Image (tube, rainbow, N blue to C red):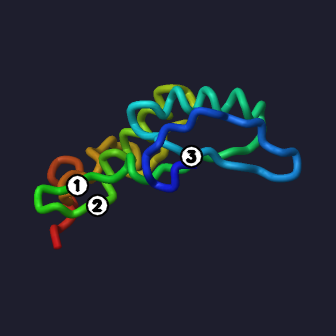
Amino acid sequence: ESKGAGLAISKYPVPPEDYDVGYAGGIGPENIVGVLEKVAEAAAGRRTWIDMESSLRTETADGRNVFDMGKVFACIDAAVEGGYHSRPNFYGNKRKSPPTSDGAGGAADGEGKRQKK
């Protein structure tokens, strides 16, 4: 566990039989598929989860540290393309651009764009 410091996980212990566990540490859009491969191997069919923190954040031009939905969608896309999950149906059947940290995106054909606050 890196406690939000973004330190990469290096060990994938087998979960105890008594309860389900998750894995954390430096997981993000660039390495999620490799991490999921190692988690799946360690878990051997057991229910598990992954936890991400710092890799899903972006520092804005004005210095704010914000949760970045673009990075979240990149992780979802990578997990889907890696065969670890089916594509969630967030927007109905029509694929739309994911929201970004600046509030843009998230709508198809200019419909329903989020308003900046």
Q: Mark 2 falls on what kind of element?
A: strand
Q: Amino acid at mark 1?
A: Glu
Q: Mark 1 falls on what kind of element?
A: strand
Taking the image as shown, residue 97 lies to the left or right of residue 15, namely left
Q: Quadrant of the C terminus?
A: bottom left
Q: Earlier in the sequence, mark 2 or mark 3?
A: 3
Q: Earlier in the sequence, mark 3 or mark 1?
A: 3
Mark 3–mark 1 contact, CB under 8 Å? Answer: no
The circle on residue 24 is 3
Q: Which residue is mark 2?
A: 66
Residue 108: % across, % down:
23, 48
Q: Amino acid at mark 2?
A: Val
Residue lying at the far bottom of the rendered structure: 117
The circle on residue 59 is 1
The circle on residue 92 is none
Mark 2–mark 1 contact, CB under 8 Å? Answer: yes
